[in-house]
Image (tube, rainbow, N blue to C red):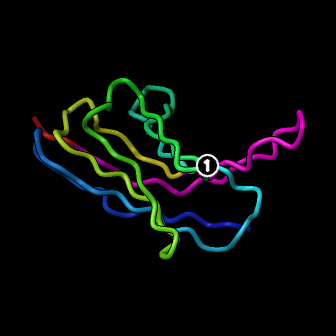
Amino acid sequence: QVQLVESGGGLVQAGGSLRLSCAVSGSDSNINAMAWYRQAPGKQRELVARITSGGTTNYADSVKGRFTISRDSAKNTVYLQMNSLKPEDTAVYYCNAERGFSGVFWLGQYWGQGTQVTVAS
């Protein structure tokens, strides 16, 4: 069983920066990617950034060039560095661990409890 605990959210002025952390406890050999999602009020949860076990990253178009996902394997922690924040980045940010597929079967995923990021204009 794996637990994900996010931290680092808060209130920041537009143009500012925040770094979110996701501490991973437990182990699951099927985890093949870590990701950050966000959900704003009245909107669907959306993928923000993802990093695979091989280090490949991908980002939502809305955050490219501003956000960076990274991981520290020694600390079992995944980070999301957020720069040049905009009011539209306001959301609850969730850490996610993907277990991927076994053949055609989706093995599921883990979620953290979320951390609030509010960007004031």
Q: Identify the residue shown where x is 76% and y is 46%.
A: 108
Which residues are the magenta region? 96-118
Work out whether residue 112 or residue 63 is closer to the camera in this orientation and state it: 63
Left or right position of 111 against 119: right
Q: Identify the residue shown where x is 45% and y is 26%.
A: 43
Left or right position of 7 against 97: left
Tag count: 1
Q: Identify the residue shown where x is 50% and y is 75%.
A: 74
According to the image, label 1 marks what residue?
Answer: 33
- Amino acid tagged 1: Ala
Left or right position of 74 against 14: right
Depicted 47 relative to depicted 53: above or below: above
Residue 61: x %, y % from top left: 37, 24
Left or right position of 5 against 93: right
Residue 30: x %, y % from top left: 76, 56
Work out whether residue 47 or residue 57 is closer to the camera in this orientation and state it: 57
Residue 102 included in the magenta stretch of the image:
yes
Residue 8: x %, y % from top left: 31, 62
Residue 61 included in the magenta stretch of the image:
no
Depicted 62 relative to depicted 25: above or below: above
The quadrant of the picture occupied by the N terminus is bottom right
Depicted 38 relative to depicted 33: above or below: above
Work out whether residue 6 or residue 52 is closer to the camera in this orientation and state it: 52
| Mark 1 surroundings: few (<14), some (14-19) or many (≥20) residues within 10 A | some
Tell me the SS state at disc 1: strand
The quadrant of the picture occupied by the C terminus is top left
Q: Main secondary structure of the magenta part?
A: strand
Depicted 48 relative to depicted 27: above or below: above
Residue 64 falls in image quadrant: top left
Residue 57: x %, y % from top left: 48, 41
